[in-house]
Amino acid sequence: MMKSKKIGVLFGGLSAEREVSLKSGAAVHCALITQGYDAVAIDVGRDIADVLKRERIEAAFIALHGRYGEDGCVQGLLELLQIPYTGSGVLASALAMHKLYSKQAFAATGILTAPFCCFRRNEVVSLKELPFGLPLVVKPVQEGSSVGVSIVKEESQLAEALALAFLHDDEILVEQYIKGQEVQVGILDGGPVGAIEIVPKNEFYDFESKYTDGMAEHIFPARLEPALYEKAQKVGLAAHNALGCKGYSRVDLLITDAGDCYVLEVNTLPGMTSLSLLPEIATKGAGLSFEALVSKIIESASLSIKVN
């Protein structure tokens, strides 16, 4: 159905993840053109509403990452313009991007997340007053791709970690460090399509590990016992559903030796680059080529708010 419409691939944008989004958008645009879709690449700026109207865009493939693209802002604009779009709606996108609110949603449905405390700028963070000790993780509340994230092992590292997180947000989380396997679950069309294990060369799966070739080993399927593998997929789907996501997502987990599955976050617009995990999971877990995945996603484009 979408081959009869003019599709705008929205990429680039204004967030700290702009460079990654440029790569995702270029790959998606190429895949659409290869398959005969009428698609144009649109680098999203503050004039995006005018551009969408000028280009007469009839559907949008959102390949944005981070703020203004993954957090419900663009989704809300597209709803107002009545342009069907890919991925989750306004509320689910906003919840997933906001780590505090997503944690609260997970907790309400019995999904495990790391114990945490939330702090605003200028509030004092004292190790003595935290309900957990070192090591701990410091992260901005609203960033993706591990931007601004630090692992603190010694008290002397805390001030620098806080300063880095506050560079990116006025609100941060301080979490208990959970040691476990880093596993990502791919969700597509309302169900899990596989779980991949990440073994980063750095201390954790940080920005460099995610977007530099050779900085992380990808193991599919994740090295888990069958029952635990199935549990991980169920937890991933539960997290996706807890936020009201639709279409597709990638859910990041930490799985402990005891078999506990801790949800780190739900990525409503996961990367679509050559090193991205959802395309790899879809290929190895569901037999979908990158082009087939892109086609399946654009064909699911819709609006959350129906106007008669």
Image (cartoon, helix red, strand yellow):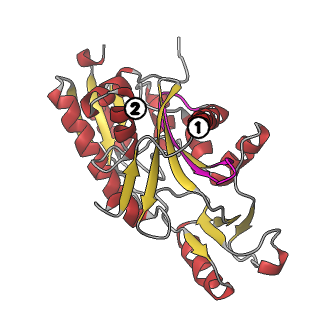
Q: Which quadrant of the figure has residue 216? A: bottom left
Inspect this view and state whether residue 56 appears: no
User: Hey, what amino acid is under mark 2?
Assistant: Gly
Residue depicted at x 71% and y 77%: 122
Is 118 located above or below residue 49 in the figure?
A: below
Residue 291: which disc?
A: none
Q: Residues within 10 Å of mark 2 (few under 14, many from 20)?
A: some
Is 139 located above or below residue 241 in the figure?
A: below
Magenta residues, start to end: 245-262
Q: Is residue 89 left or right of residue 154?
A: left
Q: Is residue 99 left or right of residue 72?
A: right
Residue depicted at x 67% and y 74%: 135
Q: Along the line of sight, which residue is nearer the eye, 242 or 70? A: 242
Q: Along the line of sight, which residue is nearer the eye, 131 or 202? A: 202
Q: Which quadrant of the figure has residue 52? A: top left
Query: Tag 2 or tag 1, which sits nearer the N-term?
Result: 1
Residue annotated with mark 2: 285
Find residue 117 and report its horizontal and vertical position in percent: 75, 64
State the quadrant of the N terminus.
top left
Is 18 located above or below residue 50 in the figure?
A: below
Mark 1–mark 2 distance (CA, rounded to whole Å): 15 Å
Q: Is residue 251 magenta?
A: yes
Extreme residue in the bottom direction: 156
Q: Is residue 173 left or right of residue 299?
A: right
Residue annotated with mark 1: 236
Residue depicted at x 17% and y 30%: 33
